[in-house]
Amino acid sequence: MTKMILSDCSSSTTSRLLPLTSHKFLRISHSRNVHFSLIPSISRVSFPSLSLRPHASSSTLISAKMAADSVAKIIDGKSVARQIREEVAAEITRMKEAIGVIPGLAVILVGDRKDSATYVRNKKKACEAAGINSYEVHLPETSTEEEVLNSISKFNEDPSVHGILVQLPLPSHINEEKMLNAVGIEKDVDGFHPLNIGRLAMRGREPLFVPCTPKGCIELLHRYGVQIKGKKAVVIGRSNIVGMPAALLLQREDATVTIVHSRTKNPEAITKEADIIISAVGQANMVRGSWIKPGAVIIDVGINPIDDPESARGYRLVGDVCYEEAVTVASAITPVPGGVGPMTIAMLLSNTLSSAKRVHGFH
Amino acid sequence: MTKMILSDCSSSTTSRLLPLTSHKFLRISHSRNVHFSLIPSISRVSFPSLSLRPHASSSTLISAKMAADSVAKIIDGKSVARQIREEVAAEITRMKEAIGVIPGLAVILVGDRKDSATYVRNKKKACEAAGINSYEVHLPETSTEEEVLNSISKFNEDPSVHGILVQLPLPSHINEEKMLNAVGIEKDVDGFHPLNIGRLAMRGREPLFVPCTPKGCIELLHRYGVQIKGKKAVVIGRSNIVGMPAALLLQREDATVTIVHSRTKNPEAITKEADIIISAVGQANMVRGSWIKPGAVIIDVGINPIDDPESARGYRLVGDVCYEEAVTVASAITPVPGGVGPMTIAMLLSNTLSSAKRVHGFH
């Protein structure tokens, strides 16, 4: 049985496109389901005194791997994200009552990708729940660059809009860089503008916004009292939207950061040195238990679909990290799903609130 | 005698402000002088076939530590910088003949710091030698921010100016960030604008300019045929003008990069893993021989004055790296002075030329 579970991860890394027998999947997905169903209760039991305040001083909260049960603490992103959304909603109520301002978030969706439509719908719902006005422009797949730029420009000028999102990916005939650069820097709630990234990289400069997913990763570390200063951190993946800004954020908090990427030789040995691992590479189960230093804290950004005939959808989602191996080595880990995922929208709401506060000088 | 030489570096790291006896200095500086006086001749002998072309394919040129003499090759920045300045001068002549355009560099100097005046004078001389028109505004120490901004704005609008430098440091009553941000992005030949830094950090984006000193470091690696891709690189120091952009540049060339800084625990062990070390920390002789992996390539950006009663000036310049120890371990090393130092102005001339070419669409 144990061997069968391990083969889940090993098959993914050696060749994740290898077809597996349905027999194997049956057992594997069963084992996974057990893990996932445990997550909410474990997290509730493990963090009875979790304060959920940023920069919690309880840096010893997660100190070392629990010798007793050899199972990592689960970093419950779903619950932290809910908490943040409640905090944002409370602040919005306070601002509305004090100065009558309601934050506004505009989303520009081009084309008919189903996944993009789902993301946009989720963002809209989250806005409504938090008390943020949401504005949406849905342009046809055949739109010209000029038409998209017109929409961006309209929102740039609209004082009731405090954040503008251009849903990616855009149709291939539209220049993504050009569109993102057109978003006014003071409404760039995604934090993707190079001016924001430049300020993030520079000491003594402050970005107006930090990209939502990496900001969510760091927020999870903060709220679980994980010390960053002086720690060795490895970020796996160097994308503009997660890996690179995550490395810059860790660096700003005085970690010693190494970025591991596709050209890195012996990524296993380098990753094994890390006290904190943020993986954002999009490769199912790539990080094995042998890559992890005992007691390390793992933030798994990957959300990778793998075939699963057991599931009604025909697939299930796993992270970049082989969860069932990592959980026996790490001191804390985010599950997939339910880890970093829910944090992204929470940070987007938080960025939109910050933007409205800044524009209106509300503290 | 050997012990005396070692004590030069050890005294600097344990406490570089410790007074040494003049007897020690006498011996030490003598030993140093021998090294320095050897540099030009060693470099000429060691690189008879040095092509001095960018991205030299001779990646085996510096492959491993020479077992025979156990002395690192000297990376002769002075000679490479001279070569680059000649290349720039030739291109300027070609452009002038083809389209009648002469590149222009404007320098704004505020106050009466002697070191700043020297730098500005050196830049002006280098411009003249390369055929670049140089413009200078010297404002009094008591200038207001508005007066400095006026000068910047005038040069921003002047089409004969292709690069603008604000000489740092500025008097303390002037906001440095505000001044640097005022320099038009297309004339930011220093590459310090956060928009340029952001583009440098992002994959698929191109900065208009790369900061001169880190660009000079990478250029030295290129021209000496040092392979960067897939190598482990450690950058010591995370300043906005050298360490951080140097790390971003190495990362763009597919090195696996770690930044070591003042909060890093056990910097020696981390540095010892590196195939390439760029040190830009400004601490005399901090990197000892024991920090260096045999065969590593060392780029030493530090230029640190240390007391030297032997010298007419009362001091001499040393790098961040303990040269006499490193030279027996590394496969190649930049001396101080004569390593990275001369590269900065060469890269500034190169950036100014690129700017003029870009504006006039000249290739």
Image (spheres, coloured by chain):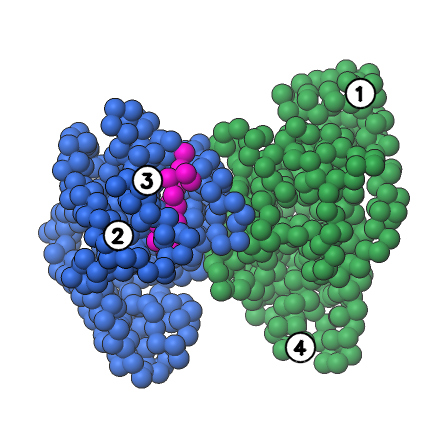
Chain colours: A blue, B green
Residue assigned mark 1: B2
Name the residue: 65% across, 67% down.
Answer: B354
Q: Relative to the observer, which residue lies in front, B280 or A199?
A: B280
**Quadrant of the image for the N terminus of chain B?**
top right
- Look at the image and give the residue range highlighted in magenta: A277-293
Question: From what the image shows, is residue A40 above or below residue A57?
Answer: below
Answer left or right for A219 relative to B18. left
Name the residue: 25% across, 76% down.
Answer: A112
The chain under label 4 reads: B
Specify which label sits upstream in the sequence, 2 or 3: 2
Question: From what the image shows, is residue B325 above or below residue B199?
Answer: above
> Where is residue A140 shown, x and y percent of the image?
26, 81
Marks 2 and 1 sit apart, C-alpha to C-alpha, by 67 Å
Marks 2 and 3 sit apart, C-alpha to C-alpha, by 17 Å
Marks 3 and 1 sit apart, C-alpha to C-alpha, by 52 Å
Question: What secondary structure is found at the residue carrying circle 4?
Answer: loop
Answer left or right for A312 relative to A275. left
| Crowd around label 2: few <14 · some 14–19 · many ≥20 (10 Å) | some
Q: Amino acid at mark 3?
A: Glu
Name which quarter of the figure residue A186 lies in: bottom left
Residue assigned mark 2: A24
The chain under label 3 reads: A
Residue assigned mark 3: A325
Q: Relative to the observer, which residue lies in front, A174 or B32?
A: A174
Residue assigned mark 4: B362
Specify which label sits upstream in the sequence, 1 or 4: 1
Question: What secondary structure is found at the residue carrying circle 2?
Answer: helix
Marks 2 and 4 sit apart, C-alpha to C-alpha, by 63 Å
> Where is residue A87 shown, x and y percent of the image?
17, 45
Q: Amino acid at mark 4?
A: Phe
